[in-house]
Image (cartoon, coloured by chain):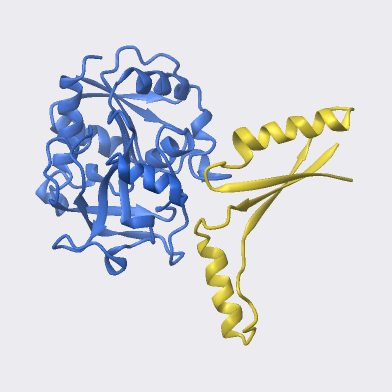
Chain colours: A yellow, B blue
Amino acid sequence: MRFRVQVMRRPGIADPEGATTARALNDLGYAEVTGVHFGRDIVVEVDIGDEAAAHARVTEMCERLLANPVIEDYTVERIL
Amino acid sequence: MRVAVIVFPGSNCELDTVHALRLLGAEPDLVFHRETDLSGADGIVLPGGFAHGDYLRTGAIARFSPVMAEVERHAAAGTPVLGICNGFQILTEAGLLPGALVANRDLRFICRPIHVRVESTDSILTRNAEVGRVLRIPLNSYEGNFVLDPSALEALNDRDGVLLRYSDSTGNVGDGSNPNGSTNSIAGTTNAAGNVAGLMPHPERAVEEILGSSDGRVLLESFVSSMEAIPA
């Protein structure tokens, strides 16, 4: 079973890549761009038959390692 | 006084750290990250480098190295624990120090001497220094931008947990003397007990005039003297 974990910087925490890219888009004429935020996609494959149990395990992995709760939020989504 | 200098796969400042500690009269031992017993250590240093390739986040994987349970135990027991650069990043990932280190504001690797101002002397890293003293020490990092949310920042300031701030050569703190965009120009912090400290610049590279500065000495001398002051 495969899960997509998306890790995003929490609002208010500095995201230098996002800020720099937003400025570049503004410079290209996209004046409507007010923010760009970088995240990270991680696909985790697990050998568990039950989807709820697998989801709970991957969530635990996010809490412990895949995301840093001090600065990041995450979502976990089943993918094919 | 025996200091365990932890070597992670990808550490690269451990020998500089050993050299500096010896110079200051301590007895450093290189300890591989798979070690699980640090019972003979009077102090612990997590040196600079790129532990585990900085994959995922800097320090994120090193924080779970087998030795870290023992580092956490020592930290809780009051043993002086110092993290330099990557070691600082590992201590924040481990939750032993607040905040996190992210990419520099200008997305450039910074490798040059910078100035920091001593903000508090209530720690193993600054106890021999004076508040307001300006030190010239090399900075060598891409992910040196210290961040934390506003409430955590307030708590850190309230308990005098900021040890060093980036400044100019005369001690003025501001955006112009903040090399990497760190929140509040923070370059080094300590925990509430004052026995765990971390900083992004490299004091071990500034301990002899031949290195261009010996300003790092007072910080490492503080660390060495704190081992004598705190029973292991």
**Is residue B95 toward the left or the right of residue B161 in the image?**
right
Taking B96 as reference, is B40 above or below it?
above
- Residue at left offset 54%, top offset 45%: B57
- From the viewer's perspective, is residue B7 above or below residue A4? above
Indicate the position of residue B83 as horizontal and vertical percent values.
34, 36
Quadrant assignment, res B105: bottom left
Position of B3 relative to B136 (above/below): above
Quarter of the image for residue B170 reads bottom left
User: Can you give x and y, in whole percent of width and height, for residue B165 in the image?
Assistant: 26, 53
Residue in front for this viewpoint, B102 or B156 = B156
Which residue shows up at 18% across the image and 45% down it?
A: B216
Task: Give the quadrant of the N terminus of chain B.
Answer: top left
* Residue that extends furthest to the bottom in the rendered view of this protein: A29
Frontmost residue, B199 versus B203:
B199
| Quadrant of the image containing the C terminus of chain B | top left
Q: Which residue is nearer to you in this view: B31 or A44?
A: A44
Q: Return the x and y of residue B205 as percentages of the image width and height.
A: 23, 46
Please report the residue visible at 29 percent of the width from the left and 17 percent of the height from the top. B41
How many numbered markers are drawn? 0
Q: Tell whether B9 sits left or right of A57.
A: left
At which x and y percent is residue B45? 31, 31
Residue A46 showing in the rendered view? no
B102 relative to B82, above or below: below
For the question of whether residue A58 can be seen, the reply is: yes
Depth check, front residue: B61 or A59 = A59
Q: Quadrant of residue B181?
A: bottom left
